[in-house]
Amino acid sequence: MDVINILPSPPHFFRLFFRLATSLLHSTLNTSRRRCLEQRILQTDFDIDSDSGFFPPQRLKRLPDTFSIWEDALAEASDKLTLGDDDRDEAIAKRPLGKAWRAAVDEWPILSTEELHDLRLQQRAHMVLSWLVHFYVHSLPPSDEDILVPKSLTIPLVAVSRSLGIAPVLTFADTVLWNCEPIDSSRPMSANNFRIVNTFSGTEDEKNFYIASAKAEFRGVEMLRIIDEFHNLPTYTDFTTISKLSRELNRLATIIGDISQVIQSVRPMCDPHVFYFDIRPWFEGSGAKGPTAPKWIYEGIEDSDKLDLSGPSAGQSSVMHALDLFLDIDHKLREKRLPAPTERNKKADLGFMERMRKYMPGKHREYLNFLAATPKSVRSLAQKIPMLRDPYDNAVLALKRLRDNHMKIATLYIVSMSRSGARSACPVSAMMAKLEASGPVRGTGGNELSLLLKAGRDATRRAVLKKMEA
């Protein structure tokens, strides 16, 4: 057989070879692209909405009629209950109403939460029950004894908390993320379309405090998009990608600056005196005033002393935790960075940020765990690529300024108020006894506030790269 004569002519042969090679290349690229898409981590897997971020995309609907006693009790609580140590005339007049309200809760049946399979219903149940717990506890007359919280509240709250993977107490999610509804129900909830549903004090100051927190969270939605895009970049070495990342880091600095302004905007909308004396006490959790303070006992719950019951804190904001992880802020002082931590930095509660994640919805905590575990580090990249150093530092310094401003707000609203005396309407009220007690000013979770905030600010400053070149 004449093999040479039956082979294609050279030009035709090379055309066939080129087509085959091109086909194989496209096949390989398509397979690679499919694998990339399959491996892409979607924020929706962590209950993060592309438009509303950590907020539910729609308002949390009222629980089924089976649970109407919970919903009705919450709806009437702020009208009937006042802080137990409030000695103003209006508060004293309401005490019989509060006593009757608590007596009714004591007699409630223990409702099963098994029918609440839907995530949004579970979130609603947690929000309602945790508000009821804090209304119940803080409307009680002052006492040095431990506080027994009735099983009609504790058993269903612990059950739904375990399902959600969140602490069985009032949290940032309950006061902000799950405490909003759209003003115009025909449009999605957004920074310009939401209102606050529940308050303890019934004051506009309290609503405005939550509004400022919610607006900061809504502004953080764009940060989550930047973080998501970074972690799903196919490469970090080409000029186009580096240029894009540089722009995104500068945009991130702008967003952080906007959030800082939102935090400062609370000042004219929420009076520090009203916040400290009429709002903040409702947030306090078990043992909030220190190691010797009365603890909460959850009736019907085994080892309830081991539960996480600190109460809500801005430190539970998942958006801010995501930002810290993205920028690689070392709150635990594990890295050797300059300037070296001060002795006061070392005395701060270095595990505070990590512990606050127990008070976040489980899905959100999983997202933070993903960010913490990913090998992709924008700080490491900025260390290697000069073009990224200034944009990275701009973002870190914006976060440092935000924490500076947060310290000023905390000083005004908590530290200064703790030294200002009791409610002006009653200078001999029971609050005076609290303020005269020795010891450091504490956050709502019972931590020394000044040490905590300064340690967070200083940890942020140590992430700046510029000094590494010296």
Image (tube, grey):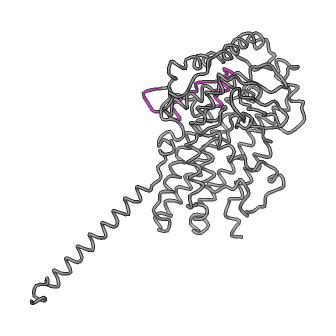
Closer to the camera, 369 or 231?
Answer: 369
Locate the N terminus by quadrant: bottom left
Closer to the camera, 323 or 301?
Answer: 301
Q: Which residues are magenta?
A: 184-209
Residue 10, quarter of picture: bottom left
Main secondary structure found in the magenta portion:
loop
Asked whether residue 167 is in view, the answer is yes
Closer to the camera, 333 or 145?
Answer: 145
Residue 269 horizontal/vertical position (percent): 67, 29
Q: In the rendered structure, does residue 193 fall within the stretch colored magenta?
A: yes
Locate the C terminus by quadrant: bottom right
Q: Is residue 38 above or below residue 81?
A: below
Horizontal side of residue 434 vs 80, given as left or right: right
Q: Residue at x 44, y 56 (%)?
A: 39
Horizontal side of residue 399 vs 339, given as left or right: left
Residue 308 horizontal/vertical position (percent): 70, 37
Q: Residue at x 83, y 37 (%)?
A: 291
Horizontal side of residue 395 vs 419, given as left or right: left
